[in-house]
Image (cartoon, helix red, strand yellow):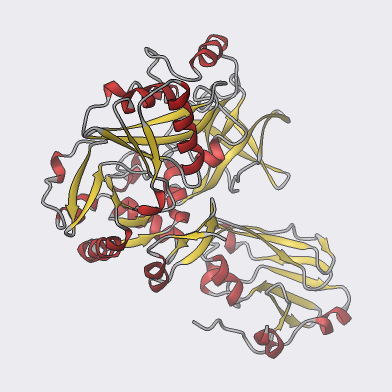
């Protein structure tokens, strides 16, 4: 049986169409995926992403545990700051990508939907193994998570909080009140637009915040946004979706997430990564933009000169560009930017060009002609 | 919102409609089908001259999130395809029974037409 968000009745009232994702029944769209996508790029959208996980990490060794189990050295992340990172197995492959927030003497980690048990157990097992005084506690079902994203997101939320949002730096996080309700607010998001995310507990107070945001955003044309547009928005920015991009087991070097690694600390998986880094000839995450009509989808093969050189992990039609876009692993020597590869869609090749991320540049809505094709 | 089921057309259980004119059959997807798909963003039409059997895949209609096969309601040869859909696939959402037609077939076996549903039977589904 799929889990519903605590805001399910509100979603139904708003006309949501539902889909199953990672064991959850969530809105895929309320109106049109294309419209919802554009609303976030041009104005502001409100997402319920309560299917994501929440894990409190508390105790004197909380910082040490995060430093050990992620590729980040948590002593570099001060109170009031959050960080995007990956949790690795000993073989260097990614268990999950996640954000962790430093909030006073504790940390809140946000693993992906359906990963709460795996991540919490992994953290506690490692804590035990390394004799660390720390506890990871899965509180996922106690939180509603909302995301407010788009050029008008700050103006919308500013109406509802006394915190001066212009002083909250990118990836900053803090406890504050929104619509009179205590929450954790972070200047983070998964759309590539200006945006904020709210962690709200107890869940009974969340509907008040949701409704208040919809009201506050009315003058900007706010819409509720489903998972359909969430996927097209993140894909246009080449953000990873763990279930797709790490499927089958991949290291951060393969996933081009090497930039998240702070090498000057000991972490689980480091040895294997160092060996892989020295070797350098592994397939890598690549962004492909179609140069002819056709929509690449997950698991489509990628060919060059009739030979397989990779596979699509995520693909869609880009609402902003009106052309097919894909992310996938491609052999290290076949992915020079500008190279033309063939994505095999229903047995027919669709030509696509290797491009540097993102597909859609920052603030696209302000200057749509700035896309380099 | 009630979907339109147009009178005078024949239908399939897989939500295709058929408009007969002599030996030719114009084919599209119903209002119900386009509403299920929502924004149609790509249509892959067959080549003119292609022979299809009843029940075989005739063409593919894609929305952002899904790929849908459209099945040949009757056997025949493709004599025309709606090329306007190459640049404007959303016409199918706007006018599924008119400008949003997909393919025109030269019907092979007229007896197959009798196996199609009429508007009343399709409505009941």
Furthest-top residue in this view:
A278
Q: Nearer the viewer, residue A333 or A5?
A: A5
Q: Position of residue A303 (x, y in %)?
A: 68, 32
Left or right: residue A177 compared with residue B50: left
Q: Quadrant of residue A170?
A: top left
Residue A369 shows in the view: yes
Q: Residue sitting at 44 percent across and 20 percent down? A: A130
Q: From what the image shows, is residue A162 above or below residue A341?
A: below
Q: Nearer the viewer, residue A120 or B76?
A: A120
Left or right: residue A155 compared with residue B95: left
Q: Quadrant of residue B10?
A: bottom right
Q: Quadrant of the N terminus of chain A?
A: bottom right
Q: From what the image shows, is residue A97 above or below residue A3?
A: above
Q: From what the image shows, is residue B104 above or below residue A318?
A: below
Q: Residue sitting at 80 percent across and 59 percent down? A: B50
Left or right: residue A176 compared with residue A118: left
Q: Residue sitting at 57 percent across and 21 percent down? A: A91
Q: Quadrant of the C terminus of chain A?
A: top left
Left or right: residue A211 compared with residue A291: left
Q: Residue sitting at 77 percent across and 68 percent down? A: B72
Residue A326 shows in the view: no
Q: Nearer the viewer, residue A336 or A58?
A: A58
Q: Position of residue A255 (x, y in %)?
A: 51, 28
């Amino acid at each position: 049986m799929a889990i519903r968000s605590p805001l399910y009745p509100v979603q139904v009232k708003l006309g949501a169409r539902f889909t199953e994702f990672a064991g959850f029944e969530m809105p895929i769209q309320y109106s049109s995926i294309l419209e919802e996508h554009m609303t976030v790029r041009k104005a502001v959208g409100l997402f319920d992403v309560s299917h994501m996980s929440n894990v409190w990490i508390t105790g004197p060794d909380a910082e040490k545990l995060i430093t050990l189990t992620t590729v980040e050295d948590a002593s570099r992340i001060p109170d009031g700051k959050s960080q995007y990172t990956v949790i690795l197995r000993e073989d260097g492959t990614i268990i999950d990508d996640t954000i962790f927030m430093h909030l006073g003497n504790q940390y809140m980690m946000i693993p992906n939907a359906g990963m709460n048990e795996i991540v919490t157990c992994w953290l506690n097992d490692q804590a035990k193994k390394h004799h660390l005084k720390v506890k990871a506690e899965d509180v996922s079902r106690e939180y509603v998570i909302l995301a407010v994203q788009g050029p008008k997101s700050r103006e919308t939320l500013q109406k509802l909080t006394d915190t001066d949002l212009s002083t909250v730096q990118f990836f900053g996080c803090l406890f504050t009140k929104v619509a009179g309700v205590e929450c954790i607010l972070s200047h983070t998001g998964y759309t590539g637009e200006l945006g904020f995310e709210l962690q709200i507990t107890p869940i009974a107070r969340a509907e008040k915040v949701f409704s208040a945001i919809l009201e506050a955003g009315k003058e900007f044309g706010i819409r509720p946004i489903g998972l359909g547009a969430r996927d097209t928005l993140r894909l246009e920015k080449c953000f990873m979706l763990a279930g797709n991009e790490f499927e089958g087991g991949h290291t951060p070097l393969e996933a081009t997430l090497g930039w998240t690694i702070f090498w000057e600390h000991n972490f689980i998986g480091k040895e294997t990564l160092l060996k892989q880094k020295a070797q350098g000839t592994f397939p890598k995450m690549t962004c492909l933009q179609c140069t002819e009509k056709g929509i690449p989808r997950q698991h489509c093969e990628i060919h060059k000169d009739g030979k397989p050189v990779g596979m699509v992990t995520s693909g869609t039609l880009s609402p902003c560009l009106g052309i097919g876009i894909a992310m996938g692993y491609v052999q290290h020597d076949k992915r020079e930017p500008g190279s033309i590869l063939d994505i095999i869609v229903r047995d027919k090749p669709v030509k696509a060009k290797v491009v540097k991320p993102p597909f859609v540049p920052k603030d696209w809505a302000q200057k749509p002609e700035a896309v380099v094709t | 919102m009630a979907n339109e089921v147009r009178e005078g057309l024949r239908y399939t259980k897989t939500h295709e409609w058929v408009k007969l004119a002599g030996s030719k059959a114009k084919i599209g997807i119903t209002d119900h089908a386009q509403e299920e798909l929502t924004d149609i963003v790509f249509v892959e039409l067959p080549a003119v001259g292609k022979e299809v059997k009843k029940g075989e895949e005739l063409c593919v209609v894609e929305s952002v999130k899904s790929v849908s096969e459209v099945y040949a309601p009757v056997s025949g040869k493709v004599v025309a395809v709606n090329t306007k859909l190459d640049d404007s696939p959303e016409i199918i959402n706007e006018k599924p029974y008119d400008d949003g037609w997909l393919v025109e077939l030269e019907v092979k076996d007229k007896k197959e037409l009798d196996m199609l549903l009429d508007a009343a039977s399709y409505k009941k589904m």
